[in-house]
Amino acid sequence: MELSHDRPAGEHRPGRNGPDLMRRLYYIAAAVPRRAWRQLTSMRTALVLLFLLAVAAIPGSVLPQRNVSPEKVRTYLDTHRQWGPTLDRFSFFDVYGSPWFSAIYLLLFVSLVGCLVPRFRGHIAALVKVPPKAPKRLDRLPAHAVVAESPGTEQDAQRIRQVLRKRRFRTAVRRDGDVYEVSAEKGYLKETGNLVFHFALLSLLIGVAYGSWFGWHGNRLLVEGDDFAFCNTLLNYDEHALGAQVGENDLPRFCMRLDKFAATYLENGQPVTYKADVNVQQNGRSTEHLLQVNDPVRLDGANVSLLGHGYAPILEYTDKYGKTSQSTWPFLPSDGRLTSGGVATFPDVNINPQTGTRDEKSQVGFSGIYLPTVPSDPSVNSSAFPAENDPRLMLQPYHGVLGFDAGAPLSVYTLDTRQIEAGRLTKFGDPLMLKPGQTGTLPDGSTVKFVGTAQWISISIRHDPGQPIVLGGAIALLAGLLGSLTGKRRRVFFRISPTGISAGGLPRSDYPGFAEEFAEIVRAAAPGASVPEQVAQTDNVEEVV
């Protein structure tokens, strides 16, 4: 008799019909997000994301950032024309605002929240619950002892409980007929510290995010003697960055003036002190402040920090028609001895007073190097000391078109190289070496006088509302780390029965000194009891709890 394997028409194989397939697809669709969420909220994933965040922050420390120094970013792009545009395309000059850094940041935030909330609920439940019942066989615990062979009573159970409570154990006494059990537990500081540590890490992320959204900062250069050259508006900043929720009208109103700056140096040129006397007008009051490194001036809504200082040569230029112009030009230091470089420009000179027209190649500029202390070796073009012991100013005159009318952004510290390369701005005579008070003459009869110098300081003005959150988080992080390292969770059990009193102990974490502590507890609970020097070890102590 042959068996036919053909199925009747209309009959489908089990599990292949429509409802079963849809149910299976539904289970798969529900399981994938659940598995992905479980993986994202695991502590291993949080550690990996934390490591990735640290690695992603490295370019922000190595490369110049637009929100801190856009001038340095432009210089880097001009110097590295091959790699610069590629790095810029992937936001390496704006790391902390880039999509990839924000993605890691948000994933770490979600991972920590998803990981900590269930652990926090479980920890609270463990703190509220009473210690568990004693295992049936105390002699299988890592530490155990026979306290007494004489019959125990309820008074013994209460006495042992008081001994454990004095040692800050959480205790519970249970009775089963003539048998009393005392369960004690201690050492939740470890898990508490662990949770505090990770919640503190979460608060650091919140503080940094809050500060970046509602904070702002800017940099400004102040020249000594200028009458309130800086008032707190965006137009007066050399560099600035506002948070996503901050507008120009949210900036606090104040004005600042640099009255005096003094610096002291060691014999090798290393700076010892920077002290700046500043005057601040805010809320209708004028106040004097001493600004130093790592000692900011704290104003209403902003902190002012001292970043650095340098020299600003004062030049007086007299054109061939006798018109005199005088200006102060900050030079930027290029080394620790304050060898400084910069430019001085005079665009509105050489205008014929009779016709009112400007001569061809009438604009004048100077590219200069300032040496606070001229070196003894004439071949060395760098300062011998940062203080002004024997200053010199080297100037190379230029005339032609400075490029101010082109509409393109220009640096105030260099001449427009595009005009020089195009031949519209050319050298005008030989270089000049001037002492303070000396005058140099140019080929057309015009003169330039080195009047002297004024000192300048660079300041950082910042408001970061996330700083208190970050500070509290950092303190809590250290406290939590200390608690997680010092906390030792352990359990101790006593059984008081008509046949005697026995005890057992169980460390829930690595605790080398538990045997000694257990011996002290037993001696305190029943003086004269013998405690074995060697304690038995079990392969899996979780089974006896």
Image (spheres, rainbow, N blue to C red):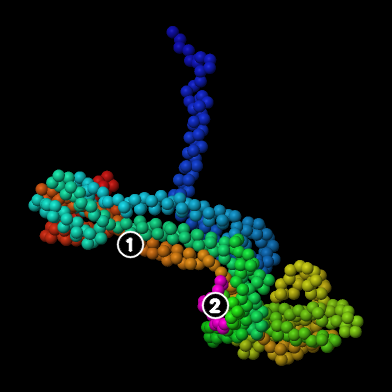
Q: Main secondary structure of the magenta part?
A: strand
Closer to the N terminus: mark 2 or mark 1? Answer: 2
Q: Position of residue 420 (x, y in %)?
A: 79, 73
For the record, the magenta segment spans 287-302
Mark 2 lies on residue: 297
Q: Is residue 488 above or below residue 450?
A: above
Q: Position of residue 133 (x, y in %)?
A: 23, 48
Residue neighbourhood size for the residue with mark 2, other residues' Cα within 10 Å, grouped as few (<14), some (14–19), many (≥20): some
Q: Residue at x 49, y 31 (%)?
A: 24
Mark 1 lies on residue: 486
Q: Residue furthest top?
A: 1
Q: Quadrant of the N terminus?
A: top left
Element under label 1?
helix
Q: Is residue 214 above or below residue 307?
A: above
Residue neighbourhood size for the residue with mark 1, other residues' Cα within 10 Å, grouped as few (<14), some (14–19), many (≥20): some
Residue type marked 1? Thr
Q: Residue at x 88, y 84 (%)?
A: 353
157 sits left or right of 222 in the view: left
Q: Is residue 167 above or below residue 227?
A: above
Q: Residue at x 53, y 60 (%)?
A: 209
Q: Position of residue 9 (x, y in %)?
A: 53, 15
Q: Is residue 288 above or below residue 94?
A: below
Residues at circles 2 and 1 in contact by the CB criterion of under 8 Å: no
